[in-house]
Every structure is written in structure tokens, then in C-alpha cells.
Amino acid sequence: MDTSSELIPRRRLYQDVLDRLLTMLNSGEFAVGSDFPPERELSERFGVGRPAVREALSTLEHLGILKVVNGKKSRLVAPTYDGLLGQIGISVGYLLNTDESALKQLVDARSIYETGIAWQAAKLATDEEVDRLRKILDAMTAARESPLAFSTADMAFHVAMAEMTKNTITISIMKSLLDWLMTRYRELVRVPGMEAITIAEHEAVYEAIKRRDSDAAATAILRHIVRADDRWRNVEPEAN
């Protein structure tokens, strides 16, 4: 009889300490901004060695939950969505460069996600936000001969559109999706003629948002993403 599914996985001691610390944090025992107990105190409280406590605290620091102050004290902080997503950026970049199916899935996810963003942007955008989008689009046009400036303005356009949703999670995920895609396509904007096509596609998105036409905005951004995906597949990614 195969009993492999019944085996209990071995855990390292610091994982048990980490579970206990997370339980303490989730219970509200410590407030954001307060000093966290030192290694020695936690070691005595849990009855474990300081190395296990140190490793658990290091994990919390990496997760953006603790911040080391003056190299000694640890302070409880509120993690941000940008910080949490940024922590997995290196791993995602590696995955995209080693697994072609991951790239396709990311592009597919972006098409679903950003279509919804465009739809909401047209519905929720203020006049000031629409004006800002126009300025970004003008900056893209002015930067046609400067790959770095053009790429920066291009990304700013998509982030500005996400900001129109007034949703912090949406904004952070949009930033991360763009960052991850650009690990593969930094050189895309240097393809001759690509700038004019990109500007025209963004212009269509802008006009739809300006008219507060959600369906048209969603259609325009999807058309841009699909066409960009087709072109990207014919561009050799920059060597890392």
C-alpha cells in the first residue's frame, strides 16, 4: 500500500517560531509602529534557541512586516502591496526567462486584468486624471527618438490608467505586471516603426476614456495588448 500521501513533512524549528509570531501579530498583540520583543525575550518565551528566533524574525523582515532599527531593535510596520509584489519580482523574472509558457500566461493575465482596468478607468476618471493622461501621451509622442524616455512614458500611461480605479491593489499589480513583462522586452521600443503604432493604440484608449466610454476603452486596450503580444513574439528579448 502506498503511504507516501500520509507522510508528515518535516519542519524546521524556525517555521514553528514563525507560525507563533504570526499568530501573535494577527491577534493584535502588537500595534503597527511598536517595538518588537528582542531575540532573547522571544527565545525564553518560546523555549527555543536564539538561532531559530533570529531566522523567523529575518523572514518577517523579508516579508516587510518588521523593520530593523539601528541594527538592534525590530519595529512592526504595515507591509505595502508594492513591497510584497516587489519581493517576488526576481523570481518572476527568472521564471519568465526560463519558461515560455509562463510568459504566455502572464500576457493572458494582463489582457484580462487591464481590460477591466480600462473599463473602470473610463467610468471613474476625473477630468484632472484625463488631462494627466493626455500629458503622458504627449510625452510619449515627444520621446519617439528616445527609447528610454518613450518606454518610461509608455509605462506611466498604463499606471496612470490603473490609478483612475482608485484601488491600491489594482495599481500595485499593474505596476508589477509591467515590470515583469519588461524584464523580457526592454528592447522592444527600439524596433523601427513600433513607436508610431504604440502611440496610435494609446491614443485610441485615451479617447475612449475621455468620452467615458467604458466598452470602447476596454476594446482599445485589449486590441493594443493582443497586437503587442504578436509583435513581441517576433522580437528577440534582451540578453540578461
Image: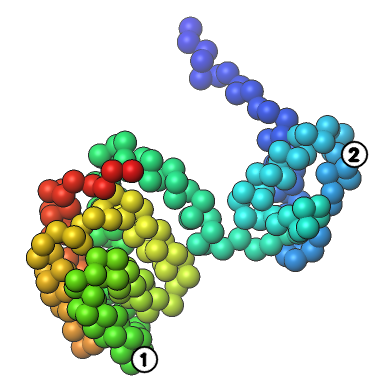
Q: Is residue 195 left or right of residue 161?
A: left
Asked whether the residues under the numbered discs 2 and 1 touch, taking CB atoms below 8 Å apart as contact, a structural biologist would say no
Residue lying at 66% horizontally and 55% vertically, measured from the top left:
65
Q: Residue furthest bottom?
A: 127
- Residue 50 quadrant: top right
Q: Which one is earlier in the sequence, the residue at label 2 or at label 1?
A: 2
Q: Is residue 225 visible?
A: no
Q: CA distance from mark 2 to mark 1?
A: 57 Å
Residue 31 at x, y percent in the picture: 76, 64
- Name which residue type carries label 1: Glu
Given residues 181 and 41, the one toward you in this image is: 181
Mark carried by residue 175: none
Classify 10 Å Cα crowding around label 1: few (below 14), some (14-19), many (20 and above).
Answer: few
Disc 1 target residue: 128
Q: Is residue 76 visible?
A: yes
Q: Is residue 191 left or right of residue 76?
A: left
Q: Is residue 73 above or below residue 140?
A: above
Q: Which mark is residue 44?
A: 2
Quarter of the picture containing the C terminus is top left
Q: Secondary structure at mark 1?
A: helix
Q: Amino acid at mark 2?
A: Glu
Q: Which of the pair 145/16 is nearer the observer? A: 145
Look at the picture and state if 181 lies above or below 138: above
SS under mark 2:
helix
